[in-house]
């Protein structure tokens, strides 16, 4: 779906889906980040407005931030798999593909290649977004091989450090010693080094983040997508706590995220030199465009 495909006359708008029309008139379709970006959430019709996730879920917050940060939502496809995240991702006004468990990076590989062949004149963004089980456990081989093949799409790991959707089993991303409902004696081995694996496999942009700062979280998402368009695989490792399995009171979810930001989820960012130069150029252009628009408005 794209504004470039459908630019209806006023009389024709009544025949289009109401949600599409509202996303054009009041939402982010065709608009810049200063008009309808993550910093302005709650002030425009958002891409995801309802979901069945648990009250206080930090993952739901990050998913909302993700959709508000997309550089070009009307030209984006998300791919997920079984897990808590897909409950919100599938509710957004962005095409979503529900893959078999753990194969989202394989599906994303084929889709991103097909888009470049079918739409060589367009920037079609593909994002594989799933939990620790889908990305680093059961989906590990397909995640790694998509990186090794230098596939041009973004992978986002929603790390709640547990299999929250299936009852509280330990995952490869659970920390050593974690006591969980289905790991009553504590996990026996270390947390997988996801960002180190991504770097070794060839990701051109990597970030680890506990998304407590919306500007930083949004910037990371946009950087990852921009870099993937031109250079290769990008990876975001985001802390998205499971307040149910880790018994975090709803009112303390943000506090928990801040605490993790000071320890194992301290902000890290890696990019190749060519990606750094490219992102600096894009961000400078966006800044100048925003200034020019503001000057015209005044």
Image (tube, helix red, strand yellow):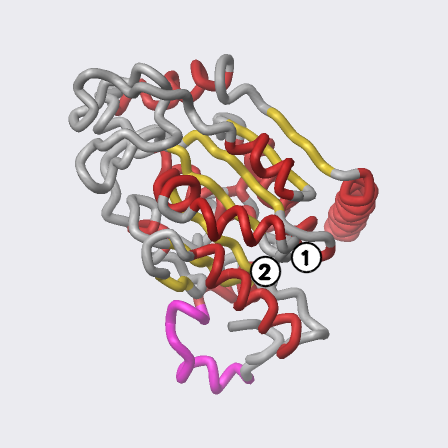
Residue 260 vertical position relative to residue 73 in the rendered view, above or below: above
Earlier residue among tags 1 and 2 = 2
Residue 15, magenta (yes or no) = yes
The percent coordinates of residue 233 (x first, y second) are 63, 49
The kind of secondary structure element at disc 1 is helix
The kind of secondary structure element at disc 2 is strand
Q: Quadrant of residue 247?
A: top left
The percent coordinates of residue 100 (x first, y second) are 33, 60
In the displayed structure image, the side of residue 290 where residue 247 appears, left or right: left
Q: Compute the Cα span from label 1 to label 2.
A: 7 Å
At 33% from the left and 51% from the top, the residue drawn is 86
**Residue 57 can be seen, yes or no:** yes
* Residue at the disc numbered 2: 125
Residue 150, magenta (yes or no) = no
Q: Relative to the observer, which residue lies in front, 189 or 253?
A: 189
Residue 278 vertical position relative to residue 11 in the rendered view, above or below: above
The percent coordinates of residue 118 (x first, y second) are 62, 78
* Residue at the disc numbered 1: 229
* Number of other residues with Cα within 10 Å of mark 2, as a class: few under 14, some 14 to 19, many 20 or more: many
Q: Which mark identifies residue 295? A: none
Q: Are marks 1 and 2 in contact (CB under 8 Å)?
A: yes
What span is colored magenta in the figure?
A: 9-21
Q: Relative to the observer, which residue lies in front, 177 or 48?
A: 177
In the displayed structure image, the side of residue 3 where residue 285 appears, left or right: right
Q: Relative to the observer, which residue lies in front, 12 or 80?
A: 80
In the displayed structure image, the side of residue 70 where residue 51 appears, left or right: left
């Amino acid at each position: 779906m794209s504004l470039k495909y459908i630019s209806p006359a006023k009389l024709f708008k009544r025949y289009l889906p109401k949600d599409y029309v509202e996303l054009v008139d009041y939402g982010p379709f065709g608009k810049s980040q200063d008009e309808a970006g993550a910093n302005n959430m709650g002030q425009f019709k958002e891409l995801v407005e309802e979901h069945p996730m648990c009250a206080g879920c930090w993952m739901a917050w990050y998913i909302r931030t993700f959709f508000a940060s997309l550089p070009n939502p009307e030209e984006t496809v998300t791919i997920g798999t079984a897990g808590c995240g897909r409950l919100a991702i599938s509710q957004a006004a962005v095409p979503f593909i529900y893959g078999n468990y753990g194969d989202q990076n394989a599906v994303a590989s084929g889709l991103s290649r097909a888009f470049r062949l079918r739409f060589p004149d367009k920037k079609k963004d593909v994002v594989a977004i799933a939990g620790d089980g889908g990305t680093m456990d059961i989906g590990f081989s397909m995640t790694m091989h998509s990186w090794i093949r230098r596939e041009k799409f973004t992978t986002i790991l929603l790390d709640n450090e547990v299999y929250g959707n299936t009852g509280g089993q330990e995952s490869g991303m659970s920390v050593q010693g974690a006591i969980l409902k289905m790991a009553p004696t504590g996990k026996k081995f270390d947390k997988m080094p996801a960002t180190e694996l991504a770097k070794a496999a060839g990701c051109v942009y990597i970030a680890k983040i506990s998304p407590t700062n919306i500007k930083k979280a949004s910037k990371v998402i946009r950087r990852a997508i921009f870099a993937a368009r031109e250079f290769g695989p990008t990876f975001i490792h985001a802390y998205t706590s499971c307040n149910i399995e880790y018994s975090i009171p709803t009112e303390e979810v943000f506090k928990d995220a801040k605490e993790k930001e000071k320890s194992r989820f301290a902000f890290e960012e890696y990019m190749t030199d060519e990606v750094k130069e490219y992102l600096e150029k894009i961000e400078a252009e966006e800044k100048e465009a925003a200034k020019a628009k503001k000057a015209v408005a005044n």
